[in-house]
């Protein structure tokens, strides 16, 4: 869940920072440029004030006299200004011809922003604000101011500035903004990690507890001491629900165990009375034999119900055990039964393979599974028991040569009292595999089934190799 929630928060915070950062960057560039423009306006206005006293009435400057000295003085000022700042400056006639310029030979282009600024000044207005200068554009900054004498525009002063330093300052400001945004993004990502961890910690705890309960560890509970109030309340509700479910299951197990135990005595007495009644009847009486068989079958069902209740109630104590040794021992114990049925019961696997299991529970589960395999395997067929180490578990497989089960029957195998309609004539209560699954689950092992090729059923017990 964190992998889905974190990108959403990061994208959201990145969008907010970009929404704030882009206008800030544009505003910073505009402020930088405005300062330069104001400075150029002041310089241009000063040159225009000096040019008022120069007798620009013809395209050519007048010679001699005080006006000529002032023109020389203006020429000197423009030259010093261009040399010191690298900014071209000049006075141009109404027709756009250079009158006094620095550097010498500078001609005002008759297009672009420079010409537009000249036309604005010629109309008696200060030139419009130039377009925004960006770090990736090598534009020049042009400002024009009219030279007014007797309420008439007699010339125009134009300054044409390079923008290298301005672009460098804008880029530096942007780098500072980017650094600040990056730092803010890192802080936001760290906060997002903490926030998602704080929010999702109760969810992960709930998930682990729910999985434990689903796999049979009914004692699992959630510690509701962190996270949002809603999730803490959910954790408390989960604990209450788990307590109620455990109580109901405990009552169910107690009822099954008590009922099985209480019914065994009357049933034993009933079977004894049947045997006594059979003494007064002829030998081989069919009804008596049928009643006796049904009574014994009912006794087996009660025994299996009691075993199931005890298996579900037991808390498996897993320990490091030699799984291969346990399996070979049970194969040896069932070999005489297999020999009587003319079935080849074999073991294949390593001589030693350790895993974490309850030896008693594992042995009981193996007994039920091997017994089930021998029941459904015909004469002269095989039942093969194998042990294999696979990653973090030890797999015990019991493969029989019986008729097997269909896909629909495989989905129901292990259900209590369920037996295939094709195998109703085989003795049993339908509880053996349920008991096996309960015994294995208590110690952390699992039991699964699949078809055995070409025929039969494969039951696999997966025992963890590491405790935990």
Image (spheres, grey):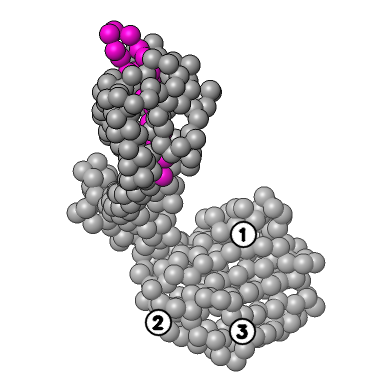
Q: What residue sits right under mark 3 in the picture?
A: 331
Q: Earlier in the sequence, mark 2 or mark 1?
A: 1
| Percent of width and height locating residue 126 | 33, 18
Q: Which residue is mark 1?
A: 290
Could you tell me what secondary structure mostly forms the magenta stretch? strand
| Image location of residue 8, percent across then percent down | 41, 43
Which residue in the protein does label 2 denote? 319
- Side (left or right) of 313 relative to 198: right
Dot 3 or dot 2, earlier in sequence: 2
Which region of the structure is painted magenta? 146-164
Q: Tell me which residue sits at (42%, 72%) in the image.
A: 443
* Tag 2 secondary structure: strand
Furthest residue to the front?
A: 64
Q: Position of residue 286 (x, y in %)?
A: 66, 60
Query: Is 147 contained in the magenta span?
Result: yes
> Residue 146, can we see it?
yes
Choose between 86 and 394: the one closer to the eye.
Answer: 86
Quick check: marks 3 and 1 in contact, CB under 8 Å? no
**Viewer-nearest of discs 3 and 2:** 2
Vertical position of residue 188 compared to residue 312: above or below: above
- Determine the secondary structure under disc 1: helix
């Amino acid at each position: 869940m964190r992998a889905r929630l974190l990108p959403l928060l990061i994208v959201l915070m990145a969008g907010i920072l970009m929404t704030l950062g882009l206008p800030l960057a544009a505003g910073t560039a505009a402020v930088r440029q405005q300062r330069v423009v104001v400075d150029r306006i002041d310089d241009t206005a000063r040159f225009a004030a000096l040019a008022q006293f120069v007798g620009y009435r013809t395209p050519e400057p007048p010679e001699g006299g005080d006006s000529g000295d002032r023109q020389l003085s203006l020429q000197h000022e423009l030259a010093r200004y261009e040399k010191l700042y690298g900014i071209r400056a000049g006075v141009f006639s109404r027709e756009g011809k250079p009158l006094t310029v620095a550097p010498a030979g500078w001609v005002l282009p008759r297009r672009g922003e420079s010409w537009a600024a000249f036309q604005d000044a010629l109309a008696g207005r200060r030139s419009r604000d130039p377009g925004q200068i960006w770090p990736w554009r090598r534009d020049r900054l042009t400002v024009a101011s009219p030279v007014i004498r007797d309420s008439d525009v007699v010339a125009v002063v134009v300054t044409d500035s390079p923008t290298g330093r301005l672009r460098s300052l804008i880029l530096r400001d942007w780098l500072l903004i980017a650094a600040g945004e990056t730092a803010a993004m890192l802080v936001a990502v760290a906060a997002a990690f903490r926030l998602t961890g704080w929010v999702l910690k109760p969810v992960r705890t709930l998930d682990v507890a729910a999985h434990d309960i689903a796999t049979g560890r009914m004692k699992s509970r959630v510690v509701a001491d962190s996270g949002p109030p809603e999730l803490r309340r959910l954790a408390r509700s989960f604990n209450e629900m788990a307590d109620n479910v455990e109580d109901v299951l405990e009552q169910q197990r107690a009822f099954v165990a008590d009922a099985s135990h209480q019914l065994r005595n009357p049933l034993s007495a009933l079977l004894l009375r049947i045997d006594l009644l059979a003494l007064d009847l002829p030998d081989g009486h069919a009804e008596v034999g049928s009643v006796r068989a049904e009574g014994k079958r009912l006794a087996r069902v009660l025994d299996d119900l009691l075993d199931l209740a005890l298996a579900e109630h037991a808390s498996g104590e897993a320990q490091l055990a030699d799984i291969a040794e346990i399996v070979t021992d049970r194969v040896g114990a069932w070999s005489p039964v297999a020999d009587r049925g003319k079935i080849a019961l074999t073991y294949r696997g390593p001589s030693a393979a350790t895993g974490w299991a309850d030896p008693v529970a594992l042995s009981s589960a193996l007994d039920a599974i091997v017994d089930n395999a021998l029941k459904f395997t015909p004469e002269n067929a095989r039942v093969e028991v194998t042990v294999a180490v696979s990653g973090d578990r030890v797999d015990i497989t019991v493969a029989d040569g019986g008729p097997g089960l269909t896909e629909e029957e495989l989905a129901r195998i292990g259900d209590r009292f369920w037996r295939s309609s094709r195998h109703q004539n085989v003795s049993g209560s339908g509880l053996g595999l349920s008991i096996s699954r309960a015994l294995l689950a208590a110690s952390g092992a699992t039991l699964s089934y699949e078809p055995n090729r070409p025929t039969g059923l494969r039951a696999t017990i997966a025992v963890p190799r590491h405790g935990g």
